[in-house]
Amino acid sequence: MDSIEYFATNALISELQRRFEDCVIIAASRRSDKEDDMVACLSGSYHGILGLIVVARMAAEQGDTHGTDSTD
């Protein structure tokens, strides 16, 4: 697999969608006090996408402050 560190945003999203069967990507950036940018990309099966959203919500509510990428 190629490193994804230097991919442009569009290429990065395409690469992640290629690597994973189900994918939910939500990103936001505050451009200025008056302008925000939000991106949501969903791919895969309906139930897979909903399952990932539930897992993401549980992780956010748990508040992983250590920045680990484990779902344990």
Image (cartoon, rainbow, N blue to C red):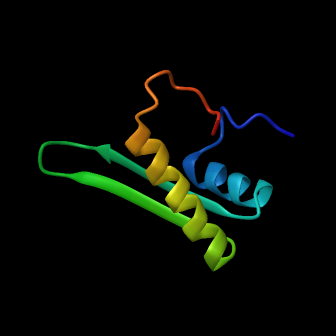
Compare residues 58 and 45 and report the one nearer the observer.
58
Residue at the location (44% across, 53% down)? 57
Residue at the location (33% across, 44% down)? 29
Q: The N terminus is located in which quarter?
A: top right
Q: Give left or right: position of 9 versus 23.
A: left
Image position, residue 2 (x, y; %): 82, 38
Residue at the location (43% across, 38% down)? 62
Q: Give left or right: position of 49 versus 32.
A: right
Image position, residue 4 (x, y; %): 70, 37
Image position, residue 28 (x, y; %): 36, 49
Image position, residue 68 (x, y; %): 58, 27
For residue 43, say whether it is visible. Answer: no
Residue at the location (66% across, 32% down)? 5
Q: Is residue 69 above or below residue 26?
A: above
View extreme (bottom): residue: 46
User: How many labels, in total?
Assistant: 0
Compare residues 35 and 52 and report the one nearer the observer.
52
Q: Is residue 1 above or below residue 5?
A: below
Q: Which quarter of the picture shows residue 61?
A: top left
Q: Is residue 20 above or below residue 31?
A: below
For residue 37, say whether it is visible. Answer: yes
Q: The C terminus is located in which quarter?
A: top right
